[in-house]
Image (spheres, rainbow, N blue to C red):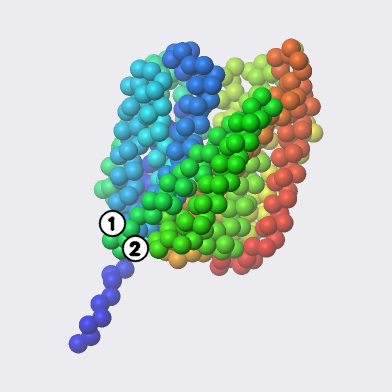
Amino acid sequence: MSATTTLAPPARIGKAAVGALGLLAVATGALESVVTPTLPLLQRDLGMSPAEGALLSIVLLVTGALVTPVAGRFGDRHGGKRVLIRLMAVVSTGGLVSSLAPNLPVLLLGQVLQGAMVGALPLSFILVREHLPAGASKVAIGVVSGLFVAGGMAGTLSAGPVAEGLSRHWMFALPTIAVAVATVLVNTLMPEDAPRRPDGSRVDWPGLILLSGTLVTLMLVLVLAPDAGAQPLALGALVLVLAGLGTAWVRVERHAASPMVDPRMLARPAVWKSCVLTFVICAGTSVPVYLLPQLFAVSADEYGFGASATEIGLYLLPGAVAASLAGPISGMGARRHGSRAVATLGIALMVAALAGLAAVHGEIWHLVLGKVLVAFANGLCVTAMVTRTATSVDREETGIATSLVLVTRVLGFAVGVQVSGAILTAGTPAGADDPAESAFVVGFVLAAVVTALSLLVTRTLTKGVEE
């Protein structure tokens, strides 16, 4: 009698379980996005200065960038469902704190806790890949990614009316309730997944601390970069600190027995190419995401349209629909034609849309169409890169590999927004309220050129459907 034992295959999941993950993606996306459109309201209500408002707008982003790779690693090590449920408990607590916050310090605490939500996506990918066949998992990853984007836009559109019609407290409370309900459904419908790494393996605390310091410093550099002329010494010191922390992190992780994020994974072509493409594409996408609302709001007496916040939200709605559709379409396209074909199509479409916005932007429908094309193209590309990465590494590395791609997505977006803000600042004449029209043109052209350069990377990707 053989002493060898075999593990039972993982239980397959149905549409209800994938739907629960999708609902969770919608709820977390909505909760993530409520601050940005209501920042002026929060500043008035809580008596915040512009500097404090800037801090509030980035703290969730910073926390998310820190939590994402950690969540992916723990999900690979201890099981995706177990970590996801605990992470959502932290997020729900953060949403409750934010909804009850009487002042800025308490609201900042709530946002720090809410930032853990960004780790939900790689954990969802672990569960999908564990419980679905390879082809179906690509489609499911696309669906979950698309619904997260749709949830973000839903939060952007609804936050203002909810805050003005009810109160700022309810704009945090409603999506938090949705997160809690979705978490209960995931816990009920999703079967347990077996840990891929031994529970007794040690946590790489030095690597985690250095990675946290590196990402926080990078975000601070991006925040200060547009005002480099006013604070050159502070920016220079932060750049030196960033270089030191990054170098120390690489050295520590290369010698760690069980690194939190193995730098050697970034040396794999499937991973680093996906990260580079995701960074460039998201940097290009963030330019119209930032510039178009500004262009809508420019006075109609000049070259803009004088749109209100509610009107801007309605103009951006078609882009939200396009972004939510792009995820599942990208997953199906990657399954049939390969990620390279999907990414190439998305990049070409985005370059054409950005060039079109630079050349023609005199009517509202020009901007609405441009936003639809950019949002759809971004959804195609990012989902293709996440899918390619998730299906090109070992199963026990799915979480950390996709986390790296999602972190570069956040960083690409942050870089693009900061560059766009700097362009508009430089293009605003002295004493004027609005930037010159040429500043918008420069931003769109620069984004188109940078995005087009990413085609040099796509040419090196694997051609076939099987990556």
Percent position of residue 109, x then y = 37, 29
Q: Tell me, yes or no, if residue 229 can be seen here.
A: yes
- Between 291 and 16, the one nearer to me in the picture: 291
Percent position of residue 49, x then y = 52, 16
Q: Is residue 299 above or below residue 374?
A: above
Could you say which quadrant of the image residue 459 lies in? Answer: bottom right
In the rendered structure, which amino acid carries the disc numbered 1?
Answer: Glu
Q: Residue furthest bottom?
A: 1
Left or right of 118: which side holds 326? right
Question: Which numbered marker is on residue 192?
Answer: 1
Q: Residue furthest left?
A: 1
Considering the image in quadrants, where does the C terminus appear? Answer: bottom right
Residue hosting label 2: 197
Dot 2 or dot 1, earlier in sequence: 1
**Dot 1, crowdedness within 10 Å: few (<14), some or many (≥20)?**
some
Residue at point 71% right, 17% down?
434
In the rendered structure, which amino acid carries the disc numbered 2?
Answer: Arg
Residue at point 73% right, 48% down?
452
Badge 1 element: loop
- In front of the other: label 2 or label 1? 2
Considering the image in quadrants, where does the N terminus appear? Answer: bottom left
Badge 2 element: loop
Could you say which quadrant of the image residue 174 lies in? Answer: top left
Q: Tell me, yes or no, if residue 170 can be seen here.
A: no
- Between 197 and 343, the one nearer to me in the picture: 197
- Between 413 and 452, the one nearer to me in the picture: 413
